[in-house]
Image: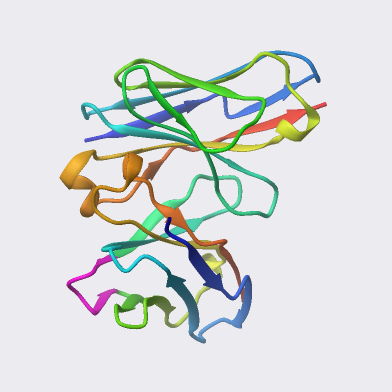
Amino acid sequence: GENVEQHPSTLSVQEGDSAVIKCTYSDSASNYFPWYKQELGKGPQLIIDIRSNVGEKKDQRIAVTLNKTAKHFSLHITETQPEDSAVYFCAASRAKAAGNKLTFGGGTRVLVKP
Amino acid sequence: SQTIHQWPATLVQPVGSPLSLECTVEGTSNPNLYWYRQAAGRGLQLLFYSVGIGQISSEVPQNLSASRPQDRQFILSSKKLLLSDSGFYLCAWRTPGQGSANYGYTFGSGTRLTVV
């Protein structure tokens, strides 16, 4: 089955700096890669996603890049703000996966220091 | 629009007591449904998923069970809770079939379960 590894597990950045989280996946058939943000005590929320026919996607201060050859994708947050502090999860899935399941990475705790 | 409801938000239960957590989805038909557990400061562990009424798949053997009595209702249960069942329980839904290639999960707000 699919295996997704996420690094780093914790990330501390100064407000205004950039944050980068990297994920690798094992199943070359995976074609959908979402990123979730989980604030303390809440359920994860989808913040951006990318499909395998696209190499990069941006949404304001957030961007995701995908390298299908190397089987890795990354989340980039620019001009970080204190409200970006949260746990971020990457995930991967492929068409016709059993139960249409997403496979999640282990999560990255991001702390933005003011 | 689609919404997902999960309750209760918090629960404190004694060891050996039963458990019932409920999740309902509105605004969609035949969703894929999922139960996840998250230990403090840890990742997301898939417990059960369901692709249709009465169809339950278990990902890990444990003290819990799940049921889907109606299309948009997913219930997580236990007959006798253990201390190790404490955690943050999340329900999620996803568009089935081809739609799953374009959409991720939508999570509920979670239930914080403390077994004492």
Q: Residue furthest front?
A: A1
- Residue B86 position (above or below residue A60): above
Q: Is residue A110 visible?
A: yes
Left or right: A42 with respect to B87?
Answer: left
The residue at 25%/75% (across/down) is: A57
Residue B27: image quadrant is top left
Bounds of the magenta span? A50-59
- Residue B15 position (above or below residue B110): above
Figure colour scheme: rainbow
Q: Residue B24 location in percent, x, y? A: 38, 23
The residue at 42%/82% (across/down) is: A78
- Residue B101 position (above or below residue B107): below
Q: Is residue A114 visible?
A: no
- Residue B5 position (above or below residue A47): above
The residue at 39%/77% (across/down) is: A72
Left or right: B2 with respect to B93?
Answer: left
Locate the N terminus of chain B by quadrant. top left
Q: Is the stretch drawn in magenta largely helix, strand or loop?
A: strand
Q: Which residue lies furthest to the bottom in this view?
A: A17
Left or right: A57 with respect to A26?
Answer: left
Q: Is residue A51 magenta?
A: yes
Q: Does the magenta stretch include residue A112?
A: no
Q: Residue A58 location in percent, x, y? A: 27, 75
Q: Residue B20 location in percent, x, y? A: 58, 17
The residue at 62%/76% (across/down) is: A11
